Image (cartoon, grey):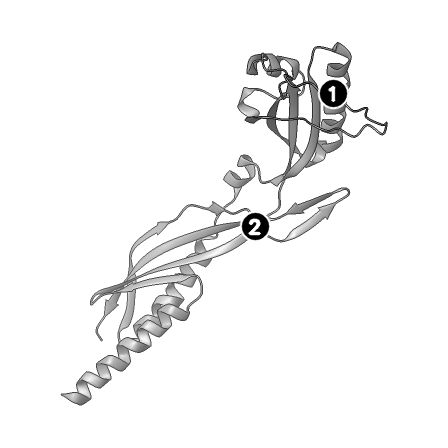
Amino acid sequence: MNAEYTALMVKRWSILTLILFVPGAFAQLDSNSVTVTAARSMSLQPDQVVFGVTVQSGLSTSLDEVVAALQGSGITAANFSGISMGPVLVFTGNPIPAPPVSPIAAPPLQWVFALPAPLAKIKDTIATLTALQKSIAQQNNGLTLSFSVQGSQVSAQLQQSQVCPTPDLLADARTQAQKLANASGLTLGTVLAMSSGPSISGSVGSVTSIPGFLLSSSPSVCSMTVKFALLRY
């Protein structure tokens, strides 16, 4: 009795050890089947640069008026990120005179927008925003515009075009399931069920560069869950 109990505990410990130390895998074992989830990570190179565009205005200005002032830049209300109160300091290369002190002066509003642009059109986007900045300043309507590069991202189109390596994921799952079957003294059978998980993109990755900017590659994770039959011979 003790010998049988010890052998059973050793076998269960071996199976648990395999589950814990197989990278990118999760497994569930029962008497007739084993279910394994395999995952692979792939890096997607960003194809867009995100510009942060800030418009400073008076308290009576509405979002519609700000968006109208940005006409021609590709910015719409859908690009609106948020609003805050406070000054915006823009370096022009000339000394900035100190503003007069007024106890009743209200801080300006800052309307913030996020404008994604293809990497190939960085210079064109900068030129468009620079021209708009000068145009708004010349109108002397109480609005000022500033912009900067906030970061990079993978476009929705590129994410949707990403194809997960189904044959490789299935092979990984079969290899992991085979190890579990061997450890339990059983034979791995046919596939009973199979499902693919969504491709999940992250925001942290390796960093590459283009002139004047730093771009971080975005990892995309593909997963597949496979249920195999277990045979007792």
Marker disc for residue 133: 1
Marker disc for residue 204: 2
User: Which quarter shows the N terminus?
Assistant: bottom left
In-front residue for pair 12/94: 94
User: Which quarter shows the C terminus?
Assistant: bottom left
Quadrant of the image occupied by residue 34: bottom left
Q: Residue at x 48, y 51 (%)?
A: 221
Q: Secondary structure at mark 2?
A: loop
Q: Name the spot of residue 41 as percent of width and height, x first.
A: 51, 55
> Between disc 2 and disc 1, whose residue precedes?
1
In the rendered image, the vertical position of residue 150 relative to residue 140, given as above or below: below
Q: Residue at x 56, y 13 (%)?
A: 64
Q: Amino acid at mark 2?
A: Val
Q: Residues within 10 Å of mark 2 (few under 14, many from 20)?
A: few
Query: Mark 2 or mark 1: which is in front?
Result: 1
In the rendered image, the vertical position of residue 58 relative to residue 215, given as above or below: above
